[in-house]
Amino acid sequence: MTKIQLIATCPMGLEAIVARELKDLGYEHTKTENGRVNFEGGYEDICRTNLWLRTADRILVKMGEFPARTFDELFEGTKALDWPDWIPENGEFPVEGRSHKSQLSSVPACQGIVKKAIVEKMKQQYKHEWFQENGARYVAEVSLLNDMALLTLDTTGPSLHKRGYRKVATEAPLKETMAAAIVLLSRWRPDRPLYDPFCGSGTLPIEAALIGWNIAPGIRRSFSSEHWPIIGEQRWEQAREEAYDSVKDDIPLEITGSDIDSNAIEIAKAAAKKAGLGAELSFQPQPVNKAVPLGDYGCILTNPPYGQRLGDDREAEKAVRQLGAMASRLPNWSLFAISPAKSFEHYFGRTADKKRKLYNGRIECALYQYFGPLPPRNQNI
């Protein structure tokens, strides 16, 4: 079987979670770096990981890595790579780029050099001087860090957080990948109640339900590499069939979301329906001080409002105070709240049992974790 060097990119702070996801999928040998996890697989693993990874952003093929302190080194190193093995004669191959702490600091210039080098390699293979580029899309990226060039091909297309169920977003949406990470970091299991009192467009409850029913997050969307001849439609069809066969939709779920914004609730209901979960999730317009979560040994997972997001510090402080008051009435529940507010614990009324630094987009946040007791072993909750 052909072995390919692959990279799962992710937001800073989620590398260990992505590595754990890969291990759970059967990929034993991973190497974690800032913002990415390296692993090895075959063509079929490009399909599997795009469909199944919940907290990664993209799956990249690692084409090569080499020192590049000059444009000549960048050109020759790029040209030496096996681009025609992946890109057919009519393939579209735009080049994206980034540079950090490197002598080659002009990203547009680096992109131009890489494009020219790929064209020259394609000329050798296909015996043409010009390429129409009207076929499948192969986005190449040159990433320069400390004078080392990493060349990759993007197999994903639009970021993996774009699951396909959210067509409309509320004012400050939580990315689907981050919502999935919060669920995976929590103590929640499908047999425990889950409640989000600031659910917005419903992302946290929906991601929890996808995990609870073992639904592959990418099952309802398309990917750039679905159109790559080197992978082939049959591998993608097989990967999707396996994903559909893995769904466990006979597990009862107790997942509820509420929000003071009735428009957000309508958006959440539409998103849940789009995700195939319309009948399984409950959303209702309700302020947090009126919320009464049902059940015992449940988990509150939420992204409470904050001043930077809403433009009103006092309202945000009030919301966190009300969240703390609700949590105090639920001694058997656990709570996990993501917030960039340094004063969160003060207004919540209690120091977190554990905090974890995460980045929601480019905003540095903390996941404040309050652990309630686990359900008794002899109790089916």
Image: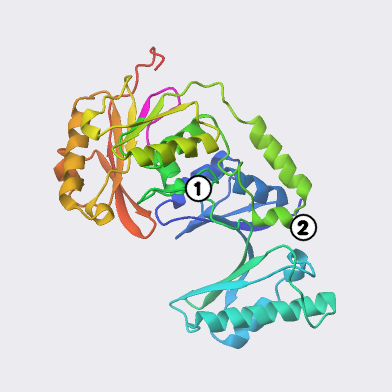
Q: In which quadrant of the rendered view does residue 108 lie?
A: bottom right
Along the line of sight, the residue nearer the viewer: 375 or 30: 375
Secondary structure category for the residue under label 2: loop
Residues at marks 1 and 2 touching, judged by CB atoms closer than 8 Å: no
Q: Residues within 10 Å of mark 1 (few under 14, many from 20)?
A: few
Quickly name the residue at label 2. Answer: 230
x and y, in percent, of residue 218 in the image: 58, 44
**Amino acid bearing label 2:** Ile
Q: Kindly identify the residue that appears in the image at 53 percent across and 29 percent down.
A: 213
> Residue 167: percent from the left, percent from the top?
50, 47
The part of the chain drawn in magenta is 186-194
Q: Residue furthest right?
A: 127
Look at mark 1 in the image and give the residue it sits on: 167
Residue 38 coordinates in the image, percent (x, y):
56, 56
In this picture, residue 227 sits left or right of residue 159: right
Q: Secondary structure at mark 1?
A: loop
**Cα–Cα gap, marks 1 and 2:** 32 Å
Dominant secondary-structure state across the stretch colored magenta? loop
- The residue nearer to you, when weighing 169 against 213, is 169
Mark 1: amino acid: Lys
Q: Identify the image quadrant of the C terminus.
A: top left
Q: Residues within 10 Å of mark 2 (few under 14, many from 20)?
A: few
Which residue does the image show at 33% across and 19% down from the upper left?
Answer: 295
